[in-house]
Image (cartoon, rainbow, N blue to C red):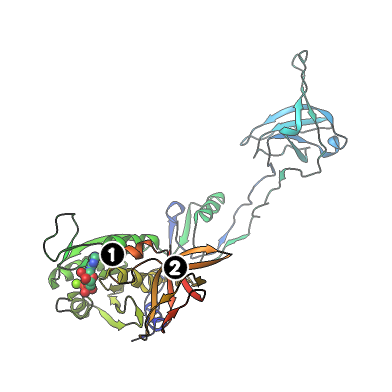
Amino acid sequence: MLPLETVREFVLDRCPARTPVSVPVADALGLVTASEIISAEAIPQFANTAMDGFAVRSADVADAPCELRVVETIAAGHAPQVTVGPGEASRIMTGAIIPPGADAVVMVERTSIVPDDSRDGAAEIVRVEVSVPPGNHVRPAGDDLHAGAHVFGVGTELTAGHLGVLCSLGMTEVKVFPRLRVGVLSTGDELVDDGSPLRPGQIRDSNRRTLLALAHRVDVVPVDLGLAPDDPDRIEAAIATGIDTCDAMVTSGGVSMGDFDYVKSVLDRIGDMAWMQVAIKPAKPLAFGTVGDVPVFGLPGNPVSSMVSFELFARPGLRSMMGHADPVRPTVMATAAEDLPRRADGKTHFMRVLATPRDGGVEVRSAGGQGSHMLWAMAKANALAVVPDGDGVRAGDPVDVLLLD
Ligand code: AMP
Ligand code: MG
């Protein structure tokens, strides 16, 4: 058996980042930047008000309360037309340009309009209740980013906030590592995927939906390659479709030592594959290699094994191809809230657990049955406890965990 780290290095070495491309910002969520983002513009571009209120000369309100003549109303998106002179103020809405002459804003809640029925078209008068320092409620130009600023470095994963910044800078395209298309194929004579009644020996295909969903979470385009029976021609045809249309492939089943494990024989014939026994439980067998330049992950068919195998090998490999500098999920230190027993077998066990916050840390307890066919407990788990070889972890002991998405 090979250590997990050795196998993962092997996988990562064969999953280099793809050639960068420019994509619309609208399509860039979850992608990784391939060039540095420099701001071409200041944000904000002009000094503006953070509050609805009145733009004033701070010197005029030093002895507040006082009264000022209202000379203009400035809405967001409209340029001021009037300079604020001594004894004057402009009504101003959040985000509008600070007018020339004014150097501070008094929020509307600290003002009142002087009632004057006989004004006859004369200027409105505002009563200001408080004195304010220069710059009060003013957001200066460049307050968030100055022009020429280094905004995001190469290797930044673009989240919702990042996309907003790119839009603020007027960018419509961004250079990134491309989003992968990842094909997912289920194999097995026993599998049914149309909800029809099961004949003897049949089971329902759960892995394909799960693996497509896990792929989605890695921000790739999941491509459903369907279900192939244990027939070498049908398996080869499905894999060929995947190789033609995808950047990477994930198969489920048919990679063990059984008589009808044809994924193994097909991939051996058309690809450059390594068949590995990893010192982990679940997910000991892993087939990984390339067909042409398309990485193929041959995951075991047991539902929990396929998910754990995806987490430990496919996810890092796909993230590496998409330019992530840190493709492997980091572990965090947790405390076992109950015994997590296991037997010594030379393997690291990835136990399905529920992680909850506790006293500023994380505590974990078993999510249920730990068999590699027990998908229910895997579905309820939100973390995998990394339990080293030995007889397990006692309640109160520290344990490393992978916090799943
Ligand atoms: P295999 O890796 O093909 O030897 O399959 C191992 C176990 O996983 C068997 O019990 C299969 O019936 C089961 N299995 C294989 N593929 C799937 C699938 N797509 N969905 C659910 N169970 C599966
Ligand atoms: Mg099978």
Left or right: residue 373 compared with residue 236: right
- How many dots with numbers? 2
For disc 2, the neighbor class at 10 Å (few under 14, some 14 to 19, many from 20) is: many
Confirm whether residue 254 shows in the render: no
Residue in front for this viewpoint, 61 or 391: 391
Where 229 sits versus 27, above or below?
below
Q: Can you name the residue that lies furthest to the right here?
A: 63
Name the quadrant containing residue 372. Answer: bottom left
For disc 1, the neighbor class at 10 Å (few under 14, some 14 to 19, many from 20) is: many
Residue in front for this viewpoint, 170 or 193: 193
Where 287 sits versus 323, above or below?
below
**Mark 2 = which residue?**
365
Q: Residue 400 at what x, y percent from top left? A: 48, 74
Q: Residue at x 63, y 59 (%)?
A: 149
Residue in front for this viewpoint, 349 or 153: 349
**Mark 1 = which residue?**
183
Confirm whether residue 56 shows in the render: yes
Name the secondary structure under disc 2: strand
Q: Residue 136 at what x, y percent from top left? A: 76, 43
Left or right: residue 156 compared with residue 41: left
How far apart marks 1 and 2 lie (CA) works out to 34 Å
Q: Quadrant of ligand 2?
A: bottom left
Q: Residue 311 at what x, y percent from top left? A: 38, 70
Q: Residue at x 47, y 63 (%)?
A: 32
Name the secondary structure under disc 1: strand
Name the quadrant containing residue 128. Answer: top right
Return the mark for residue 22. Answer: none
Mark 1 CB within 8 Å of ligand 1: no
Which amino acid lies under the numbered mark 2 shown in the image of this protein? Arg
Left or right: residue 13 compared with residue 121: left
Check whether the beta carbons of the residues at disc 1 and disc 2 lie within 8 A of each other: no
